[in-house]
Amino acid sequence: MLLPRSLKEELIKYLFFSVAAVSIFIIFFIFFFLFQEAFPAFQEMGWDIFSTNWNVSEGQYGIGAAIFGTIIVTIGAMLIAIPLGILGAIFLSELAPYRLRVILKPIIELLAGVPSIVYGFIGVVLIVRYLQVSFDMLSGYSFLAGSLILGVMALPIIISMSDDAMKAVPRSYKEASLALGATKWETIKKVTMPSSISGISAAVVLGIGRAVGETMAVSLVLGNVMKIPIPPWDMFESTGTTLTSLIVRDMGEATGLQVNALFAGATILFVIVAIMSISSNILRERVEKKFKGG
Amino acid sequence: MNLRKGYSYSKGFLKELFKRDNWEFKKIICIISIVFSSLVAIIGFASVAMSVYVGDMLLKILLGTIAILLSILLFYSYVKLHKKKELASLIVFVVIVFLLAYYMPLFPPQYGLRSYDVDASILKFMIISIILIIVGILSASFSMKPLYNFTSKSSQASAYYFLTVAILLILYPLVIIVGNIVSNGIGGISWEFLTQDVSRHGTKGGVFPALVGTLLIMIGTVFIALPLGIGCAVYLQEYAKKGKIVKVIRIAVDILQGIPSIVHGLFGLAFFVPIFGISLLSGILIMGFLTLPIIIRASEEALRSVPLSLREGSYAVGATKWQTIRRVVLPPALPGIITGTVLGVGRAAGETAPIMFTAVVFMGAGVPTDLFSPIQALPYHLLELTRYIGAYPVDQNAWTTAFLLLAVVLGMNAIAIIIREKYRVEF
């Protein structure tokens, strides 16, 4: 190379910097293009976009029912995933002997590796049929089926992140508690859990974000009817839809303002999930800061 | 006269049994109770899972009788051992045992699942089975308490029981999913299935073009995401560790990782499809963006594990920063980077939503000739087959496709784990 050494070094540094900046550009691009496509819907519909009036023949595209469905399905999923996930994480990090842990952790990561379309397929051939027979439901396609699948899908992320959070609690904390005569369980309850609560909440927040954005599995097992079920809390007979499954259902055939409305839904999803990611990260950073000194 | 004698004798016997130091007997009672309660929970779970009432009438009556006997004995021992101390848990326990004893024998088989005409009974059946599960687990964990003489160890024992139950519940869906897919799908794998085109809406023929499409997506993803991912990780770890711009980049990577796959798909539809059309290239670009954060994370982790002393040694002999990175830092970090890449590619192989509007068609694409032609892909193929279930006889092909997809994706995960274990560099 004829370039002087220091200049070359500088150039390489800026090359790496520009590569690193790509992810910022991607985020910016994604938001820009989503919003560009969604803008006509926001402009034309105003706040009506959040109404529950979805009527393709009249040109009314309120996505309120889908937002409602997203919330209900996510709540249902979290009722399953949060308690089980935290208990599983305690088992994994505090109770399981090393050998069991070495086997269990990859197995649980395997759960995360299963593609969402496979979950959806299993949902259709097993869970929906099971619900139809066992709970005597009309079709089995319901919020309940969606919540069950989403709960299982959100489990591995909550388990592995909470496990990391509990493992990050300094050994000295636990040893101090044990030295005072506390049992292992008392130590977990009074020392490990409270000091890792930020990390566990980060895991839960990220799990919620994952559940909100999950697409294929949910769209296959929901009834995909664009209305709020009556009564809204009926998990069994209610067939609604979520933002993601609405997009999957309608994007293929949508034209005109409907496309914009679907993009508006995607923009809302993007914003929700971005907020979730950032807050989860803030929580995690707090943990890191906390244990840095101790 | 005889009766009274017998009564006083049995009273004395019970008194003897529940003396504070009659440790062996207490232990046996507790263990029987734990086993029994767990059995109740398992029966309840099996009833829910298989939609049939497991266990016939005789078993139920037998278990119910044991339940009543045990509840009386345990109640007695509770009162004897702890007069007021654990009143609350005692009340809960008695209620639980009562429910248990009540529902086990009195559950008539005609409320079982097969009576479709009585729909309320089915819900009742389910609710009762779920109650059985909860009651069994609670009762078992409560039975642990006398075993440890109500010390703080006793609550530890019940907590551990709960945790074990939880981990079993977590593993259950995995067993169901993988077990069903392997047992139903492995039979359909044949040379014809792997090498023939899709025909008759997926009811006949194979998945060859879909398999090729998925492999192409995987290869293309590596070309997009690996250079960008390594570059970003090197910048973050080696050049700039702190500062505002680094913070912004990290936040961007975080957000990128969390973006739902359908949002990626819509972005591709709005950005790439107008330029490249519905094509392999659009799919590869989107999948590259999707896997980028995974690779960045893994590479950062790998770079971080290279100790500072190696770098310092390199600087000490006069190497520049770039030489140090290329010759000293990257080689030991390579296994970690490859692991992350393989994981990311595995994820890309299984995703449907990002490519469904941007790259794939169900039939007729064949093997793509260039970057700008549409492709078929396994996950999308499975989606279409799932939609046909009930309408066309696609069940066997759907199971086989699911098995194939699972094998590809989990195979990638397994490769990643093997690489990580085999080439792990210890410092």
Image (cartoon, coloured by chain):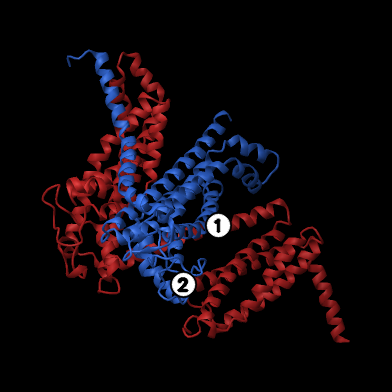
Density class for disc 1 (Cα within 10 Å; few <14, some 14-19, many ≥20) is: some
Q: Residue at x 39, y 60 (%)?
A: A218
Q: Quadrant of the C terminus of chain A?
A: top right
Vertical position of residue B127 compared to residue B299: above or below? below
Task: Find chain B in the image and tell me its colour.
Answer: red
Using the image as rendered, state which of residue A187 and residue B260 is in the foreground: B260
- In the rendered image, which residue does mark 1 sit on? B164
| Front one among A213 and B117 | A213
Query: On what subunit does the disc labeled 2 rest?
Result: A
User: In the rendered view, does A188 fall on the left or right side of A252?
Assistant: right
Callouts 2 and 1 on one subunit = no
In front: A104, or A278? A278
Residue A215 falls in image quadrant: bottom left
Query: Which percent across, then down, holds residue B387?
Result: 29, 67
Does residue A200 sit above or below B157 in this rendering? above
Residue B107, above or below B182: below
Q: Residue at x 17, y 58 (%)?
A: B209
Quadrant in the picture for the N terminus of chain A:
top left
User: In which quarter of the view is residue A21 placed?
Assistant: top left
| Mark 2 to mark 1 CA distance (whole Å) | 33 Å
Whether residue B419 is visible here, answered yes or no, is: no
Determine whether the residue tagged by mark 2 lies in a helix, strand or loop: loop
Chain for mark 1?
A: B
Name the amino acid, label 1: Thr
Q: Position of residue A4 (x, y in %)?
A: 22, 12
Residue located beneath label 2 in the image = A237
Tell me, by letter, which chain the rendering colours blue: A
